[in-house]
Structures are given as structure tokens and as C-alpha cells.
Amino acid sequence: MDFIVEYYFDFGLMGDEFGRVLDGFWLTLKLSIVGGILSLIWGLILAVLRQLPGRPAAPLRWLAIAYIDIFRGIPFLLILLLVSGSMAAFQSEGVIPRELGIPTWFGEGSPFWYGVISLTITYGAYMAEVYRAGIEAVPPGQTEAARSLGMSHGQSMRHVVVPQAVNKVIPPLLNDFIALMKDTSIVSILGALEVVQVGRDIQSEQFNGSGLILGAILFLIVTIPLARLVDVLIARQQGRTQRGGKPAPARGLAGGASKEGDL
Amino acid sequence: MTIDAEPAVSENSNAILELVKVHKNFGSLEVLKGIDLSVKRGSVVCVLGASGSGKSTLLRCINLLEPPDGGQILLEGRKLSEVSSADDINYVRRRVGMVFQQFNLFPHKSALENVAMAQRTVLGRSKSEAADRSEELLERVHLGDKLDEFPDRLSGGQQQRVAIARALGMDPHVMLFDEVTSALDPELVKEVLDVMRELAGEGMTMIVVTHELGFAREVADHVVFMDEGVILEEGPPAKLLEDPGEDRTKRFLGLVLEH
């Protein structure tokens, strides 16, 4: 027992190395936030492409479906290796300029940007599926109402369907974000000094795993509140769909016969 | 928008809308089997019939939510092609408003925003112009005090009146009503029918699919009875509702009245 406490819960060491671990966690957060935001945007674009109507848009739909199937089916580590390897290689072959092949934008190193690109490629595909579920959960009457008012497919998606779909899928998107945040640790294989890599460095320098435990604690400080937030949002959504029984100032079918229309 | 130069082929120059042998199939199921109907400008046509008789499909064909598979639709003299091009669809939806059984209000928008949204995105009205017009329309359906309420805080009757105001916001020439009171509690039906009565009084052309025989008797200029995808019988309300020629119509009216 003493060994475990000493090896993993050496608070003196945690205190000494706190600044270094926190720096690593800051990189983890930056990767998560930049990768997360880009995944949210890219996923929505994919989901909307997938829902384009009509025969002329069929190739785009097909491409979106193929993309989603392919990149949901490949491990993140493999994507990361392909992206970093090929971008560096294209750059050295002169196919793409150096600032694109070995990006160092906004003062972040190329491992950071390879990580962001790979996270976006992979999690964009996951999130596209989440958005799709949300879009399909919007009752068809909503689109019909929008179309009957003369709105185009694009206008009806933008003003009617997507806002409602996004509201419905915020909890599963947050779940994907938690998964994305944990996957940022894989970017360490490119040499990014994120929190897990810092923990490993400390472990190999001092034969002590307390740095890793400190990293785990920092992760949990972010992920546990996020998980609780997901629960609260889901409970609120369920409460809203069940509002029929709750007395509203104007009694009627708000939660009853109109359940198809409102949520 | 390009307006088709093709001359009106209407026999009846008063007709704002004419249907000639309109067919609609869903797979192997023939839902409309050749509908002929002429609607005069400013008139109210009530469509009666059992569920499954094709009433709703008829309305949905008129505004091209379901493109017809055969026949012709003439709207204000323009012949809509069978392929229902995007151009046709725009032409129709600018002129024909529709109100649905399930209201279909946008739940993430207030009453005012529900009415204003398409005015801004489709008609290109400015924010203040659309807001003014929407307020005026909501007052007209007696909801001037509910501008900022969201749909889930409104009763079914109120939601349906917002939906009517929303359709009117597009300045339609024809309004389609698809069983708009069927999802309402009985005590909320009247407030919606009253609004429709007022609208008819102001000269709006209306096609109303309904089970409200009282409304049909009082407001309709013309009543149509549909059965199994055809118009079985049509005529002025006094004749059709009091003394129908067909046994099928008599049986249907008997059932609705009993109920």
C-alpha cells in the first residue's frame, strides 16, 4: 500500500511539478477547444451536405456519406499518423508550401496543428452523425410549414430545421466533446507536450507516476462537470416534452396533441 | 420572378384556381383519381369526406407539397407544368398559403417571429417592416397580447391562429385549411373558426377541408364531397348538406352529425 501511495500520490512531487503539468494541460485544453470547435463546424457542414435534396446533389450526398463512413471507421491514431506524415512529406516534395506542410500558426507547433486537423477529420465525422440524428428528429411538418411559406430548402434548413436540430443534440455533442478531449492525449506521439506526455516525462525522470495522476485529476475537473451538464440538459429536454400536464397560463394542447410540433 | 406569358385557358374568367383531371398516386395506391374543381376568386369552398378520401392530398397537390402525377392545375391563369419546376413552386407558394392540422409553428421562435420569419427571408421585408406587419396580423387574429409568447406557452387555438397569421403574412391570394380544428379541444374550435369566418368576410379565397358542417353551411359558397379519390358530389351548401343526391354522402353526413 505504501508503495502505491508513494508512487502515485506523492503530493510533494505534485506540488513541485504542478506548473509543468498545468502547462501540459493548457495545451490539452487548447487542442480540445480548437479541435472541438472546428469539428462542430465541419460536422454540421457534412450533415447538411448529406441532407441536400434532389438528383443534382446526389454526388455531394454520396461523398458526404462515404466520408463519414470512412473516417468513423479508422482509429484516430492512424489518421494522426497519416496527416502528420503526409503533410510533412508533401511539403518536402514541394507539393504544398512549407507553411502549410509544417504549420506553426498562432505560435503553436506543427504537432498541435496536425492534432487539430486530425481531430477535426475524425470527430467531424462522428458529429455529422449526431447532427443527422437531430435533423431527422425535427418533425416533417416543420419543413412543410417552411416550404409552404415559400422558403427554399436552404432557408428552411437554416432558419427552421438546423436551429431545432442543434438544440436537440447538444447533449450528445457534449459527449463527443468529452471523447475528443481525451483523445488529444494521442497527439503526444508527435511530441506535443500535452498533459499526458508531461506526466510520462516526469515518470521516466523520477520513477514516479504522481504526475500522471495529477493529469488525470485535471481531466476529471473538466470532464465530470461536463458529464453532469449533459445530464441536466437531457433532464430539461425531457421535462419540456412532458410539459403537457404542467399548468401553463394558457391551457390547451401545448403539450398534448401538438407534441409533433413543439419540443 | 418570371411570369409565364401563356394566356389563361380558363373557361371561367372568375376562377382563381382550376383543377383539371388531377391524379396523384402513392406507389400503387391511387389517392386522387381525376379531380376537376373550379374555385372562384373570393369564394369559400369546403371539402368534406371521410378520412382517406383524398381531401388532404388534394390541398397538398394544390400548393405542390405533393406534385400531382397527372392533370392540370391553373392558378391565376398560369398553367403549372407536370414536372413542377422550381419556378412553378415559387409561383404557387407566393400565392397560396396553407394552415395545417398540427399547426406546425416553429417552436424555437416567438409568435411574432413565427409570423415575421418568411416575410423577411422570402419577401425580403426589413426587420421593422416585417415586425409591423406581423403585429398587425396577430392583432387581426386577436393575439395582439401574445406577440412575444413561444408556441409551447400558447393553447392549441392560439397556436392555430398564429399559424393563420403566419400564412397571411405572405399576402396569399388563396388560403388552404387542412382540418385546422381537428386537433383542438372542442372549446377552442370556435375561436379558430371565428377568425376564418372574418377572413372569408374580407373576401379571401379559401379552400377548407373540414368536418365542421356548421361552418360549411354558414360560410361556404360551394361544398365538395370527396370519396375514394373522386369528387362524388358538389354544390351549394344548402343543397349538398340538406338534400344530397348520393347515398354515400347521406351516410357520411349522418355519421358526422351523430358524432
Image (cartoon, rainbow, N blue to C red):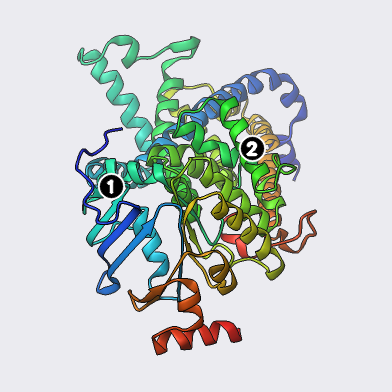
> Does the rendering let one see residue A52?
no
Residue B116 point in image, percent of width and height: 56, 36
| Crowd rating for badge 2 (residues with CA inside 10 Å; few <14, some 14–19, many 20+) | some
> Does the rendering let one see residue B146?
yes
The kind of residue tagged 1 is Gly
| Spatial CA span between label 1 and label 2 | 31 Å
Name the mark on residue B136. 2
Mark 1–mark 2 CB contact (< 8 Å):
no
Quarter of the picture holding the N terminus of chain B: top left
| Crowd rating for badge 1 (residues with CA inside 10 Å; few <14, some 14–19, many 20+) | some
Q: Residue at x 58, y 83 (%)?
A: B257
Residue under pointer 1: B77
The kind of residue tagged 2 is Glu
Residue A119 point in image, percent of width and height: 44, 32
Up-down: is A163 above or below B177?
above
Q: Does dot 1 land on a helix, a strand or a loop? A: loop
Left or right: residue B131 compared with residue B240: right
**Marks 1 and 2 belong to one chain:** yes
Q: Quadrant of residue B138?
A: top right
Residue B243 point in image, percent of width and height: 47, 84
Q: Which residue is drawn at 58% across and 44% down?
A: A167
Left or right: residue B61 compared with residue A218: left
Residue B222 point in image, percent of width and height: 44, 67
Q: Which chain carries label 1?
A: B
Total tally of numbered discs in the picture: 2
Q: Nearer the viewer, mark 1 or mark 2?
A: 1
Q: Which chain carries label 2?
A: B
Q: Does dot 2 land on a helix, a strand or a loop? A: helix
